[in-house]
Image (cartoon, rainbow, N blue to C red):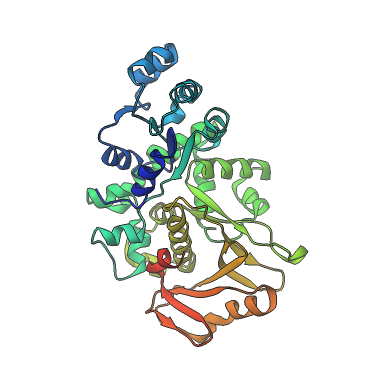
Amino acid sequence: MIPRTLTSELVAQLHEFPVVTILGPRQAGKTTLVRTALPEYDYVTLEDPDTRAIVREDPKAFLKRHDRRVIFDEIQRAPHLLSYLQGIVDERQENGQFVLTGSHQLELRAAITQSLAGRTGMLHLLPLSIAELAGAGISFEFFEEYVFRGFLPRIYDQNQRPRIAYGAYYQTYVERDVRQLIRLKDATLFEKFIKLLAGRAGQVVNYQSLAGDVGVDTKTIKQWLSILEASFIVFRLAPYYENFGKRAIKSPKIYFTDTGLLAYLLDIENVRQVTRDPLVGNLFENLVVLEAVKARVNRAQVPNLYFFRDNHGNEIDLLHKSGNELVGIEIKSAATYHASFKKSLRNFSERISPLARRYIAYSGEPMEFSDGITAIPYTRMADIL
């Protein structure tokens, strides 16, 4: 198993809360993480239909057999258990009683808020980060390798071929889980939607344009996007428009939580095709933004990540807000530095809002400039956030 950064936070929160809940996409490594970090805990998977039948029939009897130091995997399969867990933790007043994992956050978050508010720590586990791979001695010379291989742990633990692995992942989890939530009978319509969405990764989402291309209304597109986001297939990067009035763009950008799945949906069949793909800049941007998100959530921190664009063409690829300070990051896939990379950072800092720190994330070597701007390799996103 590749060691996960989140392990220390999981252990820490078990000393602070009766329950710790870990949310994240399918196959991100949640089960492996909790079972490896907590071998003394009993393990119950609610994916098992026989177990779910027992839980439905007599949840009290079930919890009498599993009443202390238990991992309940895929708790979204039996959300009614949460109210019974509430009674147990309130009665005992002990920390570290239960660990819950879940891979769908829409209804689960509402159930947790209702039953376990103030009683559970909340963590998010995304697929492997570049830093975690490096910690296990795995690194690649070119960003195209990271993009194509993606970050599902099984690809590295079991040396799976990425194209085959993501094909199975898409058919087993994305199509099955998401289509069940959408209750969509026409599989071709959903496939058309998600492939069109992949072609718009890293772009400001235009609901009307997407709806027209898919052949549904904008309300449906928004609903489908919400379900994809709740299932950790995509995430929205919010626009930063504080105090900028009407001139700032207020629609989000869409990114995929795993570049390997994104490459699969774009029909990229090998590493060489990443470089030649017309969306190579978007693929690199998705990779870098994703690393920034992982850097934050792996330390149990709210991402507080944004982008900025206005009607006058001013933009910053990535902004991180910490207190009253803004950090600006410009993302370039090039391996060679060019002076033009500084333009957006300077313009934003001088004309729109001062930036406390300014970075260029690119494929080249680290460089520090006298004007305070620093160029960093994209692999070091975890170091600056």
Q: Residue at x 47, y 45 (%)?
A: 232
Q: Is residue 308 left or right of residue 120?
A: right
Place of residue 268 in the rendered image (x, y in percent of width and height, measured from the top left): 38, 59
Q: Is residue 131 left or right of residue 331?
A: left
Q: Which residue is drawn at 36% across and 66% down?
A: 144
In the image, is residue 224 above or below residue 312?
above
Place of residue 335 in the rendered image (x, y in percent of width and height, measured from the top left): 39, 78
In the image, is residue 255 above or below residue 348?
above
Q: Residue at x 77, y 64 (%)?
A: 245
Place of residue 376 in the rendered image (x, y in percent of width and height, measured from the top left): 42, 75
- Residue 160 makes an appearance in the image: no
Work out which residue is located at the far right of the displayed protein and give it.
246
Q: Which of 239 and 182 is in front in this view?
A: 239
Q: Nearer the viewer, residue 291 or 193?
A: 291
Q: Is residue 286 left or right of residue 356?
A: left
Place of residue 343 in the rendered image (x, y in percent of width and height, measured from the top left): 58, 81
In the image, is residue 135 above or below residue 34?
below
Q: How many marks?
A: 0
Q: Which residue is drawn at 62% across and 44% down?
A: 221
Work out which residue is located at the far front of the displayed protein and give it.
93
Where residue 295 sits, quadrant-wise, is: bottom left
Where residue 115 sits, quadrant-wise, is: top right
Q: In this view, does 128 lie to the left or right of 322?
A: left
- Residue 295 makes an appearance in the image: yes
Q: Nearer the viewer, residue 310 or 372?
A: 372
